[in-house]
Amino acid sequence: MAKTLGLLYSFDRRTVVHLLLIIVLEVTSTQARAQYFQFSQFNFTPQRINPALVATSNYAQVAFVYRNQGTDGGFRLASNSLNAMYPIQSRTGNRWSGVGVSFLDDRSGQAGIFSTQEAGLSYAINIAVASRQSLSLGAKVLYQGRRINLDGLYTGSQYIPDRGFDESVSPGENFGELKSDYVTFSMGLHWQIEDKDETVAGYWDISFFDLNRPEEAFITAWPLNPTMVAGGGLRVYQRRQLSIFPQVLYTRCASNNVVNAGAVFRYDLIKSNKGSPYLDLRSGFVFGRSAVLGLQYQNDRIALGVSYDFPFFYNNVANTGAIEVGIVLKKEIARKKKQKANSKQASVAQKPKKLSAPVGVKKPPVVVRDSSAVRKDSLHTATMSERLRLKQDSLAAMGMAGQLKHEPLILEKATLRFGFEFNSAEPSAEAREYLDQLATALKDNHDLHLQLVGHTDNIGSDKFNIRLSLARAQAFRDYLVNAGVESARIVVDGKGMSEPLNDNATPDKQALNRRVEMTIVYNK
């Protein structure tokens, strides 16, 4: 009895509250592992979501996230996460697997009384299921150590009635440190689809953690319940520099369910190509707990993020407000394969066209040569304006010689195949590069006019495809107008699926039919 009184008297009221809360949290986690902890910026901690995510990007990256969370008990929870991922490519440059490591340090209570340390290793392989679609299967082994250290919370002395604490007499109790160490195994499956810019347009995944159910308790052995994490997201809107990507993350352990639903609002600061900087406004609502707002800046080298959790519609004693800050350093692993096949499908296929002479006028012997393809390297040089200028000068010379009348003539004709996504009119990064060069050429040569005709594959109704083909041509026109070309110089039309280049028998052939026909007209 004296030992018990001594222990009770050695604690002040605030310390007792802290200790009781920690014990409650420990008992809760021992019984059901009710809360598998997730960071609010979970895109910075992918290995806590699914080990398969280490093989879903061409970027090697190192990420650090710090979270500080307040509670009604007056103490704070501090969590630090460090993880790294590296994609593994084949000799042909295809990403076929990935490896990752992760570390976590989580401390709570006064002077970090309760602490958790984790170290994990993840590995995943990729399976190509369709064009720009991949399925990843991952596994993870994790070591976790948990500690409750009560040093400093009690006097370590015996309490003697009517005398107080006698430092020369031991209380006979040793609360020093309680430990729990175990190893767990996890597996996950992830599917995603990317657009031409290699930006994720949709995904779903599911993972199972702690499959081996290790014994984890400080006093008595208790099997750890497996945790299931599932999620998905889909880009539902994209126009110009704004896109909206709703997503949901669901966590279940025993009979406990946690749902985090929200959306990412992305704004491209420079709408050009892959790797351009953008801002993400991240929002979420954890049902029964809190709301989350965050802002992230990303480019092809670095990502910076900050978020804040706050009670919303609910009083959450375990979270009265939490702030997170994160940083990601990343670098794209250079592709080894040649871009010949990609550039052939995604660039411009053209056929030489002879100039049409007016009726009654002998055809000129000069044939204006069109380039056979707009290659990737030519997109970075301002040669189109010069080429069209030479053609103009040639026509002007023939007009002065009386060989041609001053009537509109076709100067160049091309089929633009920049890999339109199914049911999409959004220009790809390569298309925007080409349109930038075309806009420069049109602004340099004011006698040139443009005709744009959109086309589709054979999927969908005639009415739907007419609208889609017109939207594709209109998207190119809008881009050129925004770049400074007069709208009166551009005419658009849509043919739907009425003029296919092939029989649409395969997905690759259908992709070739999703195109815009461009005709440059000289009209002096």
Image: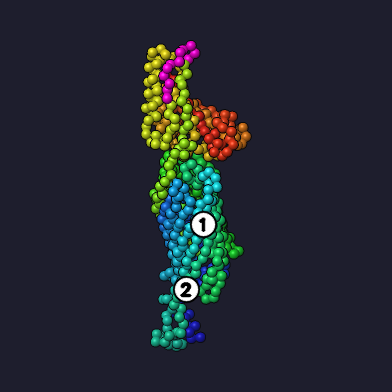
Residue 456 x/y as whole percent: 56, 34
Residue 497 x/y as whole percent: 58, 32
Q: Which mark is residue 179?
A: 2
Say whether residue 18 is visible.
no
Is 363 included in the stretch rendered in magenta?
yes
**Residue at the right extreme, as displayed:** 461
Foreground residue, 3 or 58? 58
Is 454 included in the stretch rendered in magenta?
no
Residue at (40% x, 47% y) in the render: 334
Q: What amino acid type is highlighted by mark number 2?
A: Lys
Span shown in magenta: 358-369
Question: How would you rate the neighbour count of disc 1 (Cα within 10 Å): few for under 14, some for 14-19, many for 20 or more?
Answer: many
Residue pointed to by mark 1: 138
Establish if 311 lies above or below 403: below
Is the stretch drawn in magenta largely helix, strand or loop?
Answer: loop
Dot 1: element? strand
